[in-house]
Image (cartoon, coloured by chain):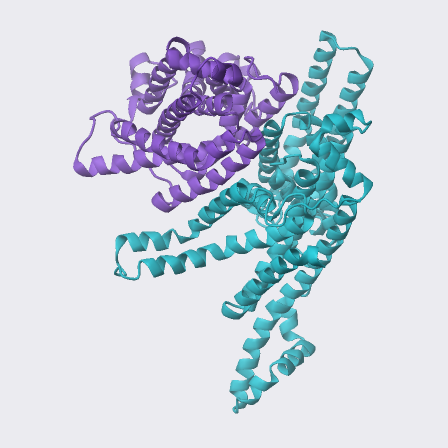
Amino acid sequence: MKQYANVITAYTIMIILIILVGIFQSWSVALSILNFCLVSAVMTMGANIQWGYAGLINFGIMGYTALGGLAAVLVSVAPVQEAWAAGGLNMIICAGIIVGMVFSIRYVLKKIEKSKKRNYLIAAIIIVGLILLRVIAGPATEHIEAVNPAKTGFLGGLGMPILFSWIVGAFFAGGLAYIVGKVALGLRADYLAIATLLISEIVIAVIKHEDWLSRGVKNVIGLKRPVPYEVDLQNSPWFIDLVEKFHSGKLKLINSVAEKQDVLNQLVIEASSVYVKLCLAGLFLIVVIVLLIITQKALYSPWGRMMRAIRDNDEAANAMGKNVVKEHLLIFILGSAVVGIAGAMMVTHDGLFTPGSYRPMRYTFLIWVMVIVGGSGNNFGAILGGFAVWFLWIEAAPIALFFINLFTSHLEETNALKMHLIDSAPYFRFLTMGIGLLLIMRYRPRGILPEKIIKQ
Amino acid sequence: MDFINAIILLLNYIIVPALSYGSQLALGAIFVTLIYGILRFANFATGDMMSFGTMFAVLLTWYFQSLGISLGVLPTALLAIPFAIIMMILYMLIIDKLVFKYYRIKKSPPVQLAMVSIGVLFVTQAIVRIIIGPFDRRFFDGERFILKANEFKEMTGLNEGLTIKSTQVLTIVVTIIVVSILFWFLNKTKTGKSMRAYSDNEDLALLSGIDPNKVVMITWMIAGVLATIGGVLYGLDKSFKPFVYFNNMLPIFAAAIVGGIGNPFGAFLGGYVIAFAEIFITYAYKKFFMYLLPESLEPDTLMQLLSTDYKFAVSFSILVIVLLFRPTGIFKGKVL
């Protein structure tokens, strides 16, 4: 028990902080923070699998998150029949051509020896393939995007429950990680960082501009939810009864019937949003706990030991007969898949998919701050990092505003400096993150909850 | 005549813009490559350091404008550059002393330094946004065009106009001057040679009596000059927006790696390779072919290889291809 004392303390402080937000700001805000903390925790677990377990640096988290989000769209949105009729067949043919290209290149690489002829052959396959793709896909995308562009203009999805997308998102992200890993994992650490960062930008560019697939910057709104809608709750008698019972003490104090009804309506509206967020928090919590159990088991299994050995000295591990390349690829895929789940969860929570909002500061570098601050190599640390950093990210602006008002209280309301500082309060979150990261890296380089090596 | 028209079209839409964009990238890429070669880490704060220097140039330009000082046809920003460079160098030296020095002395692995540079990225971005805000700022004044399309058409009687913006010429000229001085410095002076020696083999350089602190300081000073000038030139040509500068870090990295990281000349050329590739591949060649081909063969599509949305993606794909097939870059840099 003693060895977990700091873990328990850290999490207790975190929960108390969120409860304080609930008391002082509102429960709805507190629950949103909690939900995003949980999503961030899943992302940090993914990054931690790669960085903490295996020492692989992945600056492409944004790309995998976006693919997870794309999965949510492709799984849950109902298929757009007209669009499929207009260009669906062409798109399927295109997918076939891409698969054909990949396999023929693989065949050439395997069967023909390294020579100029082989290079020309591969170049020819790629060029012919690209021309075919353009000829077939060009008109089809135009037709698809022309189908009711204000509302659809894309192929739509499968129309299945959105919860499936959490798994599909993992497969999407894992698939991309397989390709990226094959290409880039041989590179030295900082090159790998740059390469993954740039590849994730390419992914975002594709999602942003291939309107037939994802509606691009026109965004997909009104995605299905795995939990009830607020409006339905507000009209269902059992929910109103529940709220009435919950607040019965408060309601008894009000005498007039009309006033009582007003207050009750207000309470029901508030409670419905809290209820929805609670349901989501429950779902997210299940994911976090399941992943935590799996990753914890993996970390202390023979496989986890091997990964740590590879991380600490890959040459020695290689000499012991461990296939370093294969294990690196595997762990790269696994970590990215977890990030993909988080991406799908985030879109599920928001109910909308906005490709334009995927930016590296928020989805790559912030996640890295979480991992480093929390403690890489330790799952509890990574989750705590997700919680603490997200909490600070949200609350930094109000805290900064408070301090600005405190320090400039002797100045007049119209003072130029004061007004400027108050306007720029939101940017203090970057400052907090940066200074926090620098301090942690300097004085506690292994994070708040450092990695524990259990000797057997 | 049609042939000349086609050439002018290419000049106007591809070559001149690519040359100026390439120069801006090249300055940033040399900055990245110097830090990588001598301080041995990938500096993720590159873009934001450039925006930090540019921010001072913008503020000073506004100040000079309010005083009524100007350079006539040239932008006032040129006058502000030296002061901005001093601020930038001061900031870089402070950051180095407070942050990077500790890890350098401890001989931390490059990855850790790269992580630290992310902390610097956050802090620098915050400072820039707090001081000047995240909005789009234009600070160009003076004469906008050297050659206007209409004037060119009248002068030559061609169908196609050629526009040359003064900022484009300014960018190219300033880049050539700065880069020539830099290469002269690196190759001919004693300090420059000691920097190259330090980059090549640190232990050997220390053994032969090179002062590492001096090398590091000079590196940051050169970096400050390059970052500020590159940033101001980009800002004059387009506009100053912190987010755009952050994003520019990506093609700059691509240019540095494509050219061979650690190799300043490679980085210089890498900037142009990336710029030309981006613009060549995303340009719509329809009009070009309309001039060259007989009417019966005229294309009915845009003749565009990739839509301009994928401008950045092009440079990143080039980077990936280079990393795959020639990881040392086009001009041999450090081996990965």
Is residue B155 left or right of A148 when viewed as pictured? left
Question: Does A345 sit above or below residue A302?
Answer: below
Question: Residue B254 location, x and y as percent?
Answer: 53, 25
Is residue A369 left or right of A97 when viewed as pictured? left
Q: How many marks?
A: 0
Question: Residue B54 location, x and y as percent?
Answer: 35, 33
* Residue at left offset 56%, top offset 34%: B112
Report the front residue among B298 and B191: B191
Question: Does B70 sit above or below residue B162?
Answer: below
Residue B170 in view: yes
In the orientation shown, which residue stands out farthest toward the left?
Answer: B68
Residue B164 in view: no
**Quadrant (top left/top right/bottom left/bottom right) for the N terminus of chain A:** bottom right
Tell me the colour chain B is drawn in. Answer: purple
Tell me the colour chain A is drawn in. Answer: cyan
* Residue at left offset 50%, top offset 35%: B117
* Residue at left offset 64%, top offset 48%: A382
* Residue at left offset 40%, top offset 14%: B192
Report the front residue among A281 and B237: A281
Q: Quadrant of residue B332?
A: top right
Question: Residue B40 location, x and y as percent?
Answer: 52, 25
Report the front residue among A334 and A9: A9
Q: Quadrant of residue A319?
A: top right
**Quadrant (top left/top right/bottom left/bottom right) for the C terminus of chain A:** top right
Question: Does A389 sit above or below residue A315?
Answer: below
Question: Residue A147 location, x and y as percent?
Answer: 63, 44
